[in-house]
Every structure is written in structure tokens, then in C-alpha cells.
Image (tube, grey):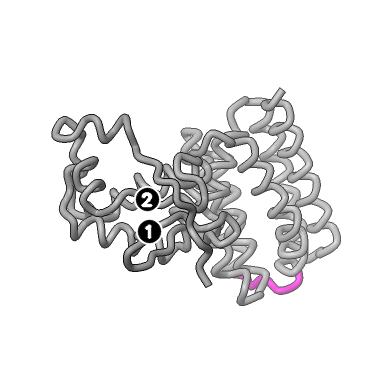
Amino acid sequence: MASKPTDALITDKPLASRRTDATRISGASVHTSLASEIGLRIVRGDYPPGTILPNEAKWTEIFDVSRSAVREAIKMLMAKSLLASRPKIGSWVEPKEHWNLLDRDVLSWYAASPDREGFLRTVQEFRHIIEPEATALAAERRTEAQMAEISQALHDMGNAASLQHRTQADTRFHVAILRASGNDLLVPLGVLIESALNHLFVHVTREDSSLLRAQKLHENIEKCIRLQKPNAARNAVRKLLANTDEIIARRSR
């Protein structure tokens, strides 16, 4: 059952004042771009939970888009549980606990919000809960093909020519381990958290010294999985996560 919206209407004054001077959202998928813009504003707190959003006509004026694009964008945000809608009331922002935080787009907006450190801590807590046991399972159950995927990602990390390529390989490494766990529920979860991990790794992998240490910790994880030592693999992941915790804490001072 949808929560009852407040009577408050928060208008987007800076954008609304532009009207025809506003930057037009264009492209092959206008409604997707519009949903992204509105979704980001919701997640970062521009429109708090319970806020009734501007109507179709207002969004059309603000972004210089068609009403059909607005309707499709609102539908997308409702599918992600950010919004609810009712005739004669309009659309309003749902409570945060209703949001689908494992949706790729929502994660991306969440990561771009002002409270980036809070986001990173949330991701780390999630990783502490999931990854040690998933890695232990991977050490027990991985196939040769899955092991090759994990090892290749590790190799690509060590030989990456840029931070972006290293981050991509790092993400592939962790997602491959989740797949190798053999737990059907972790497989789609790995795909969903890929966006969150990518934002995390970009934040914490910048200094040469931390890169070298992180590489060694990843190598230890790969070795434990390859040798099929679940307890050692579990502890190896915990050491990596502790190292990441330290980097996040150091950057937040």
C-alpha cells in the first residue's frame, strides 16, 4: 500500500525559471534521460519522501520535452519504487525503504549523491555480509572455467594501462567469484551490485602504494580459490575488505 503524500509541493525554482532557456533533454531515449535526471534529484534529497512532484505540464516546461516522455519517465521511476501515483493527486516520492536500491540506475544515483561516504560505507557493510561466505563457496564449488575467469580478471588488474581498466577488471574479479559460488541467488545479485562496486573501486584505488597492496590481497584470494581452501579464502577476503575500510576511513578524515 502506497504511503500518503504530504500536501507540500516542492517546485524546482532554478530550472523552472529557465523555461524556454532550459537545456533540452534529447536523444534516442528522452524518457530514459529524463528519468535519470529526476531520479538523481530524488535520491540526493531535492525531493524528500512524501513530496508531491510537479505535474506533467510543469516537467514539460522545465525540461522542454513532450508529455509522453514525462509519462514514460514517471513509469520508469515507479517501477524502481521511487515514486507512487494516484489520480487527482499526482506522483509523490516514496519512503527510502521502498526504493529498489539494487537497481543499477538507483545505485548510480545513490553513488552520485552528496553523501558519497555514507554510500561507500553501506556498500562495504553489504560486502562484509556477502563476499566472505560467497568466496568460501567459490573455493569449494568453482569449475575450471570459472577459475579461469577469476584468474584472467586478476591478470587484467595487474596489467591494466589505466585506472578505469583496472577498476573494470577488479569488478569482474568480484562478480566472477559470486558466480563461482554456485548459489543461484548470488548470480543476479552480482550483476546488480556491479555498479556499486565500480563506484567504490574508483574511490579507493588511486595511489600506487594502495594499488600494489590491493593487488597482493587479490592474488591471495585467487590462490585460495584455486587451491580450493574455503576457510583461507574467507579470511583472505576479510583482509581485503579491512584494507578497503581503512582507505575509506583515511579519505574521510
Is the magenta region chiefly helix, strand or loop?
helix
- Report the amino acid beneath label 2: Leu
Can you tell which quarter of the image residue 75 is in?
Answer: bottom left
Q: Which residues are magenta?
A: 140-144
Which residue is at 85% across, 61% downward? 231
Residue 152 relative to residue 83: left or right: right
Q: Which residue is mark 1?
A: 91
Q: Earlier in the sequence, mark 2 or mark 1?
A: 2
Q: Nearer the viewer, residue 19 or 133?
A: 19
Task: Say above or below: 181 vs 32.
Answer: below
Residue 172: image x %, image y %? 54, 54
Residue 130 relative to residue 178: left or right: right
Which residue is at 35% across, 40% downward? 11
Task: Say above or below: 152 vs 3.
Answer: above
Task: Say above or below: 140 vs 49.
Answer: below
Q: Which residue is mark 2?
A: 53
Compute the Cα span from label 2 to label 1.
6 Å
Q: Is residue 141 magenta?
A: yes
Asked if residue 192 can be seen in this view, the reply is no
Residue 9: image x %, image y %? 40, 45
Which residue is at 67% across, 26% downward? 251
